[in-house]
Image: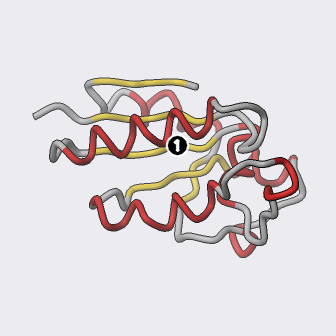
Amino acid sequence: MKKFLFVLRTCPHNGAWAKEMLDVILTTAAFDQPVSILLLDDGVFQIKKNQNPDFLGMKDTAAIFKALELYDVNDIFVETESLSERGLNVIDLCIPTESLSQKGISQFMERFDVVFSG
């Protein structure tokens, strides 16, 4: 069984890319593959509390992240520097995460067989 890591770097409501990546994550997890998620750069906004994308005609990605637990996707990581650069803290996030420093990201990624970035 291969271990999958999905690296999300984009804002949640900047086109359909974030939603499409979440669909791929859910599909992978539905086939009982071990899935982890790493949020970098503007990707940290995908799990920010109190999103209101309705006026953009988009879905709330934070709500989709909350459903990941149903698919046994519980390993969600955020880069500490990405949070702080955007004025966020772990208390601003809607789901539990584990923080990683920028220095440890490369070594962390080596633990996975397949890495998708988006």
Query: In the shown orientation, is residue 40 left or right of residue 83?
Result: left
Instruction: Name above or below for residue 39 compared with residue 116.
Output: below
Q: Is residue 52 shown left or right of residue 34?
A: right
Q: What is the secondary structure assignment of the residue under circle 1?
A: strand
Measured from the top left, where is residue 8 in percent x and y?
59, 36
Q: Amino acid at mark 1?
A: Leu
Residue farthest to the left, as pictured: 1
Residue found at x 19% / y 42%: 33
Question: Is residue 51 shown left or right of residue 111?
Answer: right
Q: Residue at x 43, y 37 (%)?
A: 108
Q: Quarter holding the N terminus?
A: top left
Pick the quarter of the image with the C terminus: top right
Task: Please tell me which residue lies in front, 22 or 118.
Answer: 22
Can you tell which quarter of the image residue 31 is in? Answer: top left
In terms of depth relative to the viewer, which is nearer, 16 or 98?
A: 16
Q: Residues within 10 Å of mark 1 (few under 14, many from 20)?
A: many
Q: Residue at x 30, y 31 (%)?
A: 112
- In the displayed orientation, state which residue is furthest to the bottom: 91
91 versus 41 height, above or below: below
Observer-nearest of 59 and 75: 59
Position of 57 with respect to 40 (left or right) is: right
Q: Position of residue 41 (x, y in %)?
A: 74, 37
- Please report the residue visible at 31 percent of the width from the left and 44 percent of the height from the top: 35
Q: Quadrant of residue 49?
A: bottom right
Q: Position of residue 5 (x, y in %)?
A: 39, 35
Which residue corresponds to mark 1?
38
**x and y percent of residue 80 in the render?**
69, 52
As drawn, 58 above or below 24: below
